[in-house]
Structure formats: C-alpha cells, structure tokens
C-alpha cells in the first residue's frame, strides 16, 4: 500500500490536456487523496461546469493509478466548494507564465470581478501596455489579449 | 404535488432553459460575425450545457426512475420540455441573439445568486459554480447590446426591433408554476417576483446606455413551462436528438 504522499507524487504526471505543462494538482483540480482500508479515493473538482477536459483528467488519474499497480480505487467528482483560480499554486502560476499564458488576477482583487481588470502583463515581454481583445479565448478558462508593445497576442487565464 | 415532484420539475426546467439556449447559441459555431464572437458564443454554450449536465443528472436522481442526463436531453419529446419560450426562438440575426441572451442573462444571474443560498445543498453547489460563469455571460451580452444600440443607425434599428419582438416572451420568466411556488415557500428557490425587480433594473440600465427604448408591457406569451411551445422547438429538438433517436444508446 502506498502513502498519500506517494500517490500525490504519482498524480503529478496527470496534466491539464489543454495546458500540458500544469498538473491537476497545480491547477487545484485535485482536491483530496484518501486511503480507506486498501482502497484509494481521489477527489477532483471541475474548473468550469462545462469543461470538456474533465473527463480526460479523470481518465488520466485512473491511468496513473493503474500504471502504478493500484487496482482498488475510486475517482470522485465534487462541485462544492466551487473551484476558483485562487487554488492555482504558485508553481502553477509560474508554469503558466513560462508557457505564455498570463496567470489570473487574485479574485480578492475586486476590480477583476467588476470587469475593470487590473493591468495584465504580457507573458512575452513583460509590458503592461496590453489590450483585451475578447473575454472568451481558446478555452472556457481563458481570455484573449494583445500586447501593444511587442504586438504578440496571448491568452490570459481569467479570474474565476 | 409533493415536494419531490416539484423539485424534479423545477430542476428539469432550469436544465431545459439552459440546454435549449445552449443549443441555439451553438448554432453560431462556424457562423459567428467575427471570429472572437464565434468563440465567445461557443464558450457560453459550453458553460450552459455544462450547467445543464449537472442539473439533468440531479433531476434524474430526484425522479428515481434511472433516467440519465442523456435520457432526459435526447429522449424527451417537445411537450415534455419545460423551458420558457424565450430560449427556443430561432437565433435570427446577431442583434436578436444578443438581445435574447441579454434578457435571459439578466434573469439567470440573480437566479443563480439566489440559489447559492438555497436550502437544497445540491442546487447550492451547482449554483456556486454557475454564478461566476453567468456573470461573464451577462457582461458579454450587455456590452454587445450597448454597442449595437449606441452604434450605427442600422445596428440601432435591428437591436430595437429585436428587443421589441422579444419583449412578449419575457413575462413567462417571472410567472411561477405550481412547483416554483411551492419551492419558494421553503427557501429552495427564490420568489420569481423578487427576481423581477433586479431584472428590471438591469434591463433599464443597459437599455438606457444602449439608447434603446424599453417596450411597454402588453400581451405576454406563455405556456413553455407547461410544455406548450412555439413551432420552433420541435425542429430544433429533431436536429439535436437525431443521433440518439436513429442509433439508440450510441456512444462516442
């Protein structure tokens, strides 16, 4: 039987299929690992209600457990408490930026919720002279920006 | 009507409203007026259909007859759909699509906000996720309605015509049926008349900024909540359901 820490390490290889550099733990989708007798129970939560990547993440968890020889497991999906971008780890935010996606503002920043977004820095050149092109980007969780300094368009993980 | 029956009906209706509007918005996929809007509408459709999945799964559990979210979505006929008529009207032009979304979003947001305080834990959890999504939807439809209303002569004309045409379908949103009345008494659902005040304030604010006129209240359409629909829902369901109807039980 493996420990919770070992299982957590093994689930590190399960990535968000849309952003393959960030693990489900960094994303905050992995909510818990419990050992009940000889069984492992993994709890995950969706980012958006209609996130099509959820089924793939669930399958990823199941594959990772099976590959490690764990047969007795259950993957449980919960809605509450509702996922928020505040659960993305510091490591996750760093990886997003490196990947070319501006990390989300903190939801406690009321400007983000009121629609008056604080300045979003370009992940390419760092300039804050950027412009929102569309609140809806390539996936449900991202908005589309363009940097006025280096002209590069980029995705921003939006506050949620 | 027992409380369980009422809850099944009310949850089913919320799912149907979102599913039908989600399907109408998905019809813009590949046909959006500009690329960004094509993507926006499909994202919003995805949110609505995701919320539908949560709601219909819950409805199936409440009913206790073993019907899944897919059974409820794909194997019910037109008269068994309980959505308001507002959401089933054809997408028409972009001004119409935006105006319809706006009138629905302005109702949907306070509904979800109220449901985050529902005494039903399941509805509360679903709303806890949906509320942030719907905030984005309302912002999107408001901004576009303002842009159209306060835009060119042509965009103003089309936006005003859309609002005028849609107005008679907004009444139904706020007329509770027996199930909704019952559930408002014990704090499972908000009172629809309470939501109306907030809807009305949002509508006034946005129409005013869009330089559009609020139509006078006249005759209001109804019946959708009882399963009586316009001639448009049937053909829409035929298209949406054809795969499951032709190949029962087919899976990806």
Image (cartoon, coloured by chain):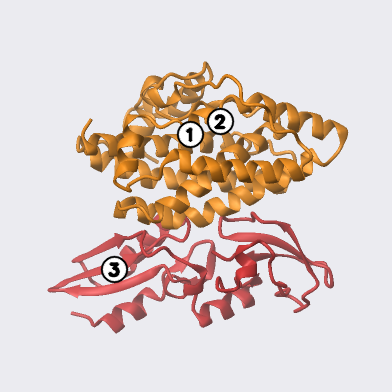
Chain colours: A red, B orange
B192 and A92: which one is in front? Answer: B192
The label shown at residue A66 is none
Q: Residue B46, percent across and down?
A: 52, 46
Residue lying farthest to the left in this orientation: A37
Please, is residue B23 above or below residue B188 in the view? above
Residue at x-position 42% and y-position 74%: A25
Q: Are discs 2 and 1 located on one and the same chain?
A: yes
Q: Which residue is mark 3?
A: A42
For label 3, count other residues whose C-alpha is less than 10 Å away and answer few (under 14), some (14-19) or many (20+).
Answer: many
Is the C-beta separation of discs 3 and 1 under 8 Å? no
Q: Residue at x 36, y 24 (%)?
A: B80
Disc sitting over residue B170 in the figure:
2
Left or right of A77 on screen, residue B1: left
> CA–CA distance between discs 3 and 1?
42 Å
Q: Please tell me which residue is depicted at 30% across the width and 55% down the height of the picture.
A: B121
SS category of the residue bearing label 2: loop
């Amino acid at each position: 039987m493996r420990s919770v820490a070992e299982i957590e390490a093994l689930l590190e290889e399960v990535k968000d299929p849309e952003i393959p550099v960030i693990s489900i733990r960094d994303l905050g989708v992995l909510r818990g690992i419990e050992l009940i007798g000889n069984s492992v129970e993994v709890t995950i939560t969706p980012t958006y209600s209609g996130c099509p990547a959820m089924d793939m993440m669930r399958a990823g968890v199941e594959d990772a457990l099976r590959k490690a020889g764990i047969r007795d497991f259950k993957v449980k999906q919960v809605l509450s408490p509702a996922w928020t971008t505040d659960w993305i780890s510091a490591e996750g935010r760093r990886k997003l930026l490196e990947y070319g996606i501006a990390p989300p503002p903190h939801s406690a920043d009321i400007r983000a919720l009121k629609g008056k977004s604080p300045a979003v820095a370009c992940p390419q050149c760092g300039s804050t002279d950027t412009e929102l092109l569309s609140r809806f980007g390539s996936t449900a969780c991202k908005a589309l920006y363009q940097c006025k300094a280096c002209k590069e368009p980029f995705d921003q993980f939006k506050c949620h | 009507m027992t409380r369980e029956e009422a809850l099944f009906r009310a949850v089913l209706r919320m799912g149907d409203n979102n599913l039908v509007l989600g399907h109408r918005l998905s019809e813009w996929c590949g046909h959006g007026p500009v690329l960004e809007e094509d993507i926006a509408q499909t994202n919003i459709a995805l949110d609505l259909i995701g919320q539908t999945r949560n709601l219909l799964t819950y409805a199936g559990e409440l009913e206790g007859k073993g019907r899944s979210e897919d059974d409820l979505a794909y194997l019910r006929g037109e008269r068994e759909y309980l959505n308001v008529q507002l959401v089933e009207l054809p997408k028409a032009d972009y001004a119409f699509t935006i105006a319809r979304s706006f009138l629905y979003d302005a109702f949907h947001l306070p509904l979800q906000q109220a449901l985050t305080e529902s005494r039903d834990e399941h509805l509360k959890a679903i709303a806890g996720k949906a509320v942030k999504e719907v905030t984005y939807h309302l912002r999107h439809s408001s901004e576009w309605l303002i842009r159209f209303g306060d835009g060119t002569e042509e965009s103003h004309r089309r936006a005003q015509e859309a609002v005028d045409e849609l107005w008679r379908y907004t009444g139904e949103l706020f007329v509770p049926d027996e199930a909704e009345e019952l559930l408002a008494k014990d704090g499972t659902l908000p009172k629809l008349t309470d939501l109306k005040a907030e809807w009305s304030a949002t509508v006034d604010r946005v129409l005013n900024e869009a330089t559009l006129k609020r139509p006078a209240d006249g005759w209001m359409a109804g019946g959708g909540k009882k399963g009586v629909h316009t001639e448009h829902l049937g053909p829409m369901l035929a298209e949406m359901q054809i795969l499951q109807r032709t190949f029962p039980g087919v899976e990806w």
